[in-house]
Image (cartoon, rainbow, N blue to C red):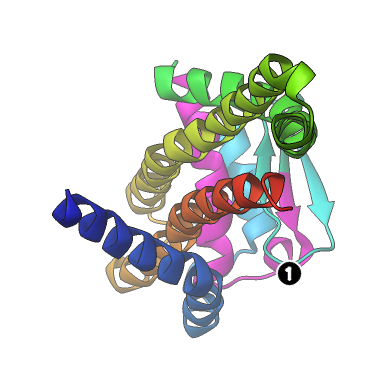
Amino acid sequence: MLEIYFVVLIILIIGLFIAGTSYGRLIKTYQKYNTRAYVNITAGQFVLGALDYLNLPDHKIAISEKPLSDAYIINKKVIVISRQNFESKTISAISVSAHEIGHIMQQMSGSRLFAISYLFQVLSRVADIFLFPSLLVGGGLILFSQNYLELGNIIFFVGIGFYIITLLLKLITIPLEFNASKRALFLLKSERILDDDELKGAKKVLRAAAFTYVGSLFYNLLRLIRGISRSFED
């Protein structure tokens, strides 16, 4: 039993290290490959060309002023590109933008993982609203009200259920993000947007971006531990 606890502890320590360093590693890798690509087009031009290549006239582009806020909003068919990437001709900018195209390619292919992830995104928004109130109210009733002990247990474990939903989303997101990056790299290579040396840099940028989701998984696990401990504080 002690061996199991030790292994779990080591995994948590490694996970929290990834959570604490993944974003900084992404920034460092992004800046390293923030050099002009030989194709000499902006990431915005690449996205427009990719949408035309995939025959998706109904998809739109939105510009975000927040750095590295690139995303794909599924239900609105909108690709959000940060302005720093949209106007840039660098390997990093094109790679990050291609990743969002990778998500569209997942949707077009009918990926089950993509569909499940979208479902959990919807559930996760609800879970985020009720997670900590459920843990706090349920924990309070368990500690301070014997008359409502059963109700407190129900509310508390509903909160745990909400958290599990958010954790499952983070877990599902990891292979989804790696797959989107794989599709992005294939597109960049097949359409000769980046050459072989530039693709090596693109791969490193996208891998660093994907590891921020691994870090997010462990960060959410830490949130659960904190939430449970806070709910039982005197």
- Residue 75 visible in this rendered orientation of the protein: no
Residue numbers of the magenta segment: 80-109
Relative horizontal placement of residue 62, taking residue 116 as reference (left or right): right
- Residue 173 visible in this rendered orientation of the protein: yes
Nearest to the observer: residue 108 or residue 117: 117
Nearest to the observer: residue 38 or residue 130: 130
**What's the magenta bit mostly, secondary-structure-wise?**
helix
> How far across and how far down the image is residue 77, in percent?
71, 27
- What residue appears at the point 48 percent right and 38 percent down from the top-left corner? 173
Residue 43 shown in magenta:
no
What amino acid type is highlighted by mark number 1?
Answer: Gln
- What residue appears at the point 61 percent right and 35 percent down from the top-left corner? 51
Q: Is 112 drawn above or below residue 30 in the view shown? A: above
Q: Is 7 drawn above or below residue 187 in the view shown? A: below
Which quadrant would residue 193 be assigned to in this image? bottom left
> How far across and how far down the image is residue 67, in percent?
73, 67
> How far across and how far down the image is residue 105, in percent?
48, 30
Nearest to the observer: residue 196 or residue 234: 234
Q: Is 204 drawn above or below residue 212 in the view shown? A: below
Residue 82 shown in magenta:
yes
- Residue that numbered label 1 is attached to: 84
Which quadrant would residue 127 be assigned to in this image? top right
> How far across and how far down the image is residue 147, in percent?
78, 17
Element type where label 1 sits in the image? helix
Relative horizontal placement of residue 229, taking residue 149 as reference (left or right): left
Of all residues, the one furthest to the front in this rendering is 146
Relative horizontal placement of residue 232, taking residue 193 as reference (left or right): right
- What residue appears at the point 80 percent right and 35 percent down from the top-left corner? 133
